[in-house]
Amino acid sequence: MKLKDLTSYLDSAVPLSLQEGYDNSGLQVGLPERNISSAIITLDVTEEVLNEAISNKCDVVISHHPLIFHPVKHLTCSSVTERILYEAVKNDVAVYSAHTNLDIFSNGVTRKMAEKIGLQKINVLVPSSDKLLKLVTYIPETHLEAVRNALFDAGAGVIGNYDQCGFASSGTGSFRAGEMTNPFRGQKGEIHFENETRFETILFYHLKDQVIKALLEAHPYEEVAYDLFSLENKNSVTGLGCIGEMTDPLSENDFLRLVYSVFDAKGIRYSNLTGKQVKKIALCGGAGASLLKVAINAGADVFLTSDLKYHDFFDAENQILLVDAGHFETEKFSSEILKDLLIKKFPKFAIRFSETNTNPINYF
């Protein structure tokens, strides 16, 4: 298949529109029209990972952390990023990254963490609030079912764990066709009144183009009237962090042992023990210090994340056990998410996990 087939699928399966404004997810290096047959998946793109890809004849490196995160002003191999870029282009190896969009994605990095430690009743900790649109359109009554089904098939109408959500109300629409038209009903130059249904539904922002395309293809009118409204509603499916519950409560020490085992976290840092049983757990893969107050307000017994600063541990204020298990450790399962997505879509595409440990931190 072509590189663009893989990137287009990932761009929509883990929507690029979900990424934070500072991020640079998506295709970093490579020609979209190039034929590819294999990929290697990694957390970070390092020189060792690229050499591993080259030696195994992998056409694409797929990573969580972007290779190009800051502007590249020249390509003189004077930095690690420049050397990797030079060798990737030289050896015709593409690089694709899914970063904060994979964090915010409904089945993303933090939810994978929660599943790994056996949490139940998992919900988003900080739901997204600017990723939803409302679509309103007007459909002749005879075509309501066909247009509504086309919109739902394109992904509209999803609210939480419910789908095919919409609202319809009847009314009378009017229009007068001009001389250059071919009206579905009525005569040119004469006002026409039609029994129509006002239909409204909700959709994720990243589905806008495909939903509107489906609307225009299924609707019988030459000129389709529709409105799109940005919503401030919180989206319970996507967002930062997760919160869930242990099936059976653990002591704080036993929970720390669980984290050590599951994440192979050899350098766990944690705040003062509170003496409480651990039942409700808040998590955020990678750097999640900004979510500490949210975790406390949500009633979590533990907040598991990484990249905490010295004073962050004071902010726990003995209300919560604050645990830093390491950035690499909390995000390393991102490779599993990406592999599962690709195998489901491209079962015959060769995919391998990188065998390179890209963690830049060592423990004595």
Image (spheres, rainbow, N blue to C red):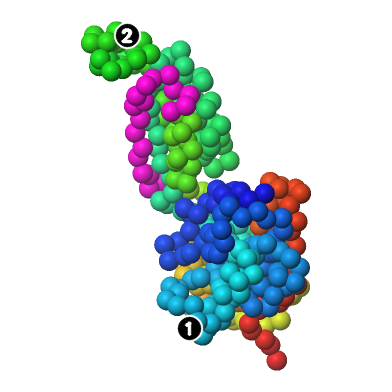
Nearest-to-viewer mark from 1 and 2: 2
Name the spot of residue 328 as percent of width and height, x first. Answer: 64, 74
Q: What element carries label 1?
A: loop
Name the spot of residue 107 as percent of width and height, x first. Answer: 62, 53
Amino acid at pointer 2: Gly
Identity of the residue drawn at 76% across and 49% down = 348
- Specify whether residue 198 is painted magenta: no
What is the C-alpha distance between the residues marked 1 and 2? Answer: 72 Å
Label of residue 311 in the image: 1
Q: In which quarter of the image is residue 120?
A: bottom right
- Specify whether residue 224 is painted magenta: yes
Q: What stretch is highlighted in magenta?
A: 216-234
Q: Mark 2 points at which residue?
A: 186
- Disc 1 crowd rating (10 Å Cα; few below 14, some 14-19, many 20+) is few
Position of residue 309 relative to residue 247, above or below, is: below
Name the spot of residue 207 as percent of width and height, x first. Answer: 48, 42
Q: Which of 160 and 300 is in front in this view?
A: 160
